[in-house]
Amino acid sequence: MPAAQPSRKFTLKAFVEELRADIAHNRIKLPTLPNISLEALVVVNDDTSTVAEVAEVVERDTAIAARLVKYANSPLYRGVKPVTTIKAAITRIGFDKVRHAILTLAMKEVFKTGFKPLQQRMEELWEHSMDVATRAALLARDIEHIDQEEALLAGLVHDIGAIPILLKAQDYEVLVNSRDNLNKLIAPIHAAIGRDMLKVWKFDPRMVAVAAEHENLNRDPGNAPVDLVDLVIVANVLSHADTDHPLARVNYRDIPAFRRVNWQPPPPEDGPEQEEETMEDIEELRDLLI
């Protein structure tokens, strides 16, 4: 990969305008999902497709196939007996939900860059996205009308807008050589860029809303049902607990999403056993995504 280009003068306004235009006109090389995942999604989205046809496509990629079976045996779907075949995995997950499962399992490939100076930053973004995803999925267990696999995917894509920013940042030495400058750039614009990116990828509008609104801690839809944005806001704030991130210093009581999902800190009587069980669930879900 070429080194950062110090000749390019950086201004925030010009950077954002150029990036949005690049995304709108397909001029930026956005990360793409693996071909086998795209092919499987086409089959899944065809109302005439069968379980056998989806299984046939997925089986062509042994890595995706193995991970889909693992996904079906995860805490999201675990049954009495583990499934061992692609067809059984699809049946357990449910045909309508396989699309979310395939997108979730393929998402890791999107969080990659061949530009070494920014590779660690991309890896950190993936780690954070996994943490938010698993927390959102666990929160969804208590929300009857939200599927856990949808919450898992929503958590993975909430910061997706940071990816094209990182890819474009490699052209600017002032960004590559300063973590603070890069963070100051990503913070105010990644939500809007993420919204644009997921629209280009034709994601579900609810996922687009997560990317667009997850930083809005004052968001309050009133009496509307709890939604994916609520879960991801809570999961995102909790993921920064005990860090030096600004979200670690917010008061949960001041954030409507915490009230809407009825989040409460674990009571003392739950003891270390309950906390350990929760951490085991988080680790098992994270293991799905690695």
Image (cartoon, rainbow, N blue to C red):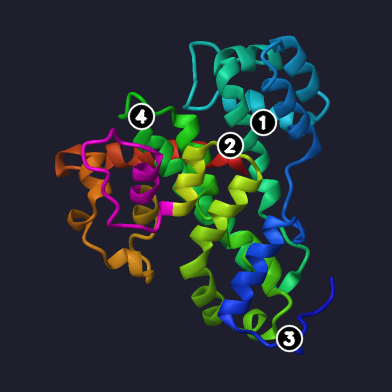
Q: Secondary structure at mark 3?
A: loop
The residue that mark 3 highlights is: 8
Q: The disc labelled 4 sits on which kind of residue?
A: Arg
Indicate whether residue 226 is drawn in magenta: yes
- Please report whichever mark, 1 or 3, sits nearer to the chain's N-terminal start: 3
Q: Secondary structure at mark 2?
A: helix
Callouts 1 and 4 close, C-beta under 8 Å = no
Q: Nearer the viewer, mark 1 or mark 4?
A: 4
Callouts 2 and 1 close, C-beta under 8 Å = yes
- Please report whichever mark, 2 or 3, sits nearer to the chain's N-terminal start: 3
Alpha-carbon distance for marks 1 and 3? 42 Å
Alpha-carbon distance for marks 2 and 3? 41 Å
The crowd level at tag 1 (other Cα within 10 Å; few <14, some 14-19, many 20+) is some
- Please report whichever mark, 4 or 2, sits nearer to the chain's N-terminal start: 4
| Majority secondary structure in the magenta region | loop
- In the image, taking residue 95 as reference, residue 29 lies left or right, namely right
- Please report whichever mark, 2 or 1, sits nearer to the chain's N-terminal start: 1
* Residue shown at the point (36%, 50%) measured from the top left: 233
